[in-house]
Image (cartoon, rainbow, N blue to C red):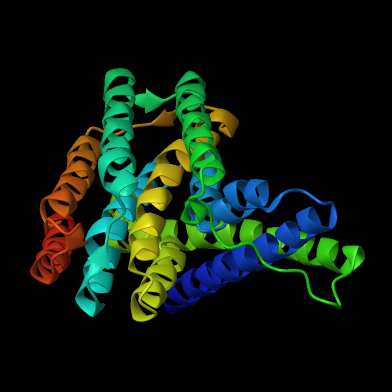
Amino acid sequence: MLLDIVLLIVGFILLMKGADEFVEGASKIASLLHIPQIVIGLTIVAFGTSAPEAAVSIASSFKGTAGIAIGNIIGSNIANVLLILGVSGMISALAVKKNTYFIETPFVIFISIVLLLIGYSGGSISRFDGIILWGLFLLFLGYLYYLTKHGDENAIDDVPELEEGDRMWKLLLIVVLGMICVVVGSQVTVDAASRIAQLFGVSDRIIGLTIVSIGTSLPELVTSVNASIKGKNDIAIGNIIGSNIFNILFVLGTAALVSPNAIPFASHFVIDGLISIGAVIMFMIFIDKEKRLRKYGAFVMLLSYVGYLIYIL
């Protein structure tokens, strides 16, 4: 038991560190190849915070632990809104950009409904469903590209700058090592989480919705809390909404495409999916006329997450 907990922590560390190093190295290689920063920011860097969820969900789909694969995504999206925005909103008043409130946030609700419909109707997420999710993902990337071309620099994440000592061979080594850490970390995490679930007699779904989802959401937590402390409040919210979109469309879409079999969608996930939609609606309700998240609203969201954990456990 203790060994599995240690392995789970080690797995999370490998995931986080590996994702950071991979993004850093890949972004700098792209810069050396004179690829525009806008393209790097919309692809390599943007994928960075979703890399842990992607690695865990893809590894889970191959190992037949669908509960972790889907629970990780839905659980991460619930944690992102209720837990991370709740904590960030308690630190400082979070500002919401107009396009985030009127376009991106409703888009999260829309794709969450799409996920529930395709999952519930077929009882699984098939390769064809993965194509649908990826089609919506490409549509979202096109929207981000449109924003950046019209002067919205916050539509993309910061791209790491080249340093004097950066060489192609060194950056390639960093990318390879980063990818190895992500792959190994995902395997260790899924295996340890599965054994812990068996020891406690709980389902993979519960482990995916709780321990794994919170662990893989750590990059978003760190990014959003830091942004709140530094007063970059619109980045804190944009980071979370963007991450939720990436989780459903990119992460689950990719897992469905590469999985040898359709990923089973348990009926219990319908309730969890509805809660994830309700969390986003709650967030929108607590936005005041000045487009700021009310502090008491952030507290209620945080309290709601505690209630959700009590409910599923």
Of the pair 312 and 153, the residue shown nearer to us = 153
Could you tell whether 17 is left or right of 76 in the image?
right
Quadrant of the snapshot with the C terminus: bottom left
Name the residue rendered at 34%, 74% in the picture. 228
Residue 28 in view = yes
Residue 311: quarter of image: bottom left
Could you tell whether 73 is left or right of 98 in the image?
right
In the rendering, at what x and y percent does residue 190 appear? 49, 56
Residue 184: quarter of image: bottom right
Of the pair 147 and 115, the residue shown nearer to us = 147
Name the residue rendered at 47%, 63% in the picture. 192
Does residue 11 lie above or below 249 as drawn? below
Could you tell whether 174 is left or right of 270 in the image?
right
Residue 185: quarter of image: bottom right
Could you tell whether 7 is left or right of 24 in the image?
left
Of the pair 251 and 240, the residue shown nearer to us = 240
Q: How many labels does the image show?
A: 0
Name the residue rendered at 85%, 77% in the picture. 164
Quadrant of the snapshot with the N terminus: bottom left
In the rendering, at what x and y percent does residue 52 appear? 52, 57
In the rendering, at what x and y percent does residue 197 appear? 35, 58
Residue 181 in view = no
